[in-house]
Image: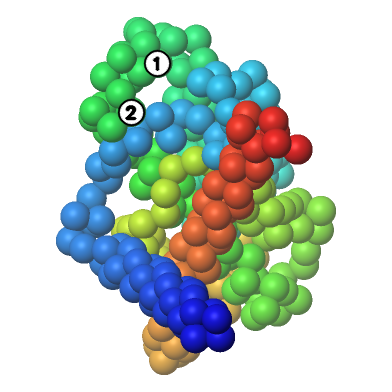
Amino acid sequence: MCVSKLYKDNSKYVYQESMHLTGKFAKKKRLCNEFQVKNFGFNHNRVDQFYRSQWQSGERSWFYLIYRWIWMLCFAGVFLVCLSLQYSDGKYFIFMTNWGVMLGLLTQFVAAVLVTRWQFNINSLRTNICEMGAQGSPTTPLVKVYWLLHGITMSVSLVITTVYWSILHGKMNKPMRFPVLSFVTHCLNSVFMLIDFLMVGFPVRVLHTVYAMLLPIIYFSFTIVYFLCGGMDEYGNHYVYPILDWTSPMRGVITFAGVFTLYCIYAIVFYSIYKFKRFLHRSFSTIWSPHCVGLI
């Protein structure tokens, strides 16, 4: 009797240990798969995820459609107000913060267009994807552009917020004319994008960070050319940001390295949040499935 019980207990322990090791191996394998060369690309076998929210249960969602257009109008409103108040003979376009606002507007506009096409089945989009099966539908160029834009905007929004509030706030050597607008573009921009990140259903690719990093490379190159050409900000400073004052090149190099480090950190953070979001979705889907509800 005791031997039999001991055998059962040992078998149970061995089974649990085996399942634990299998789970750990599977997680490690999934993480390694993220770094495959194919994940530099923008093909995905669930195209419907780019048109639907992570949390909607049906094929269509009026709530998600309305949300998409509200978010787009918010970004459009911020952009138009900033442009009208801070244009300063075109100087508006030299600041990375405003690049982030424009990227956010473009991202939200493309997202609203995609969801609208899905909701109203324009050109039989939804019908074709459903008939072919989500896994048999090609990833269209517009979807690829949206995926790229979303990743770039997410990264740059959080980098802007981090750098501004940790280094630049109160140290710009210029008066803050519009404090509310500054708060919106340096803080709420990240809040809006994080909320959007939680809403969307498509995956995060760690290797897509390479494309997001092209933006700071382009911007840093722009500030160097702008400096060499004698460009100034609206107050006559010979730099765009104090931390990019190219009369002290080492300061700019250190800033460049710091920004790249932030991009790497946020890539891991975004991927972790994405996996946690997927876990929550699976958990709630199981709990509220008809089978489970019937057992409550």
Q: Position of residue 195 (x, y in %)?
A: 65, 48
Residue located at (35% from left, 32% from top): 47
Image height check: is 139 above or below 16? above
Q: Position of residue 236 (x, y in %)?
A: 59, 68
Residue located at (44% from left, 10% from top): 121
- Label 2 sits on a secondary structure element that is helix
Figure quadrant of the C terminus = top right
First in sequence: mark 1 vs mark 2:
1
Q: In which quadrant of the rendered view does residue 18 lie?
A: bottom left
- Label 1 sits on a secondary structure element that is helix
10 Å neighbourhood of mark 1: few (<14), some, or many (≥20)? some
Tag 2 residue:
134
Q: Is residue 239 left or right of residue 129?
A: right
Figure quadrant of the N terminus = bottom right
Whether residue 182 is visible to the viewer of this picture, yes or no, is no
Callout 1 touching callout 2 (CB < 8 Å): no
Q: Position of residue 173 (x, y in %)?
A: 69, 76
Tag 1 residue:
126
10 Å neighbourhood of mark 2: few (<14), some, or many (≥20)? some
Say what amino acid the circle numbered 2 marks.
Ala
Residue located at (46% from left, 47% from top): 150
Q: Which numbered marker is on residue 138? A: none
Q: Nearer the viewer, residue 142 or 28?
A: 28
- Residue sticking out furthest to the front: 1
Q: Nearer the viewer, residue 7 or 185?
A: 7
Q: Nearer the viewer, residue 133 or 68?
A: 133
Image height check: is 285 above or below 39? above
Residue located at (62% from left, 71% from top): 162
Q: CA distance from mark 1 to mark 2?
A: 10 Å
Q: Position of residue 283 (x, y in %)?
A: 60, 49
Say what amino acid the circle numbered 1 marks.
Arg
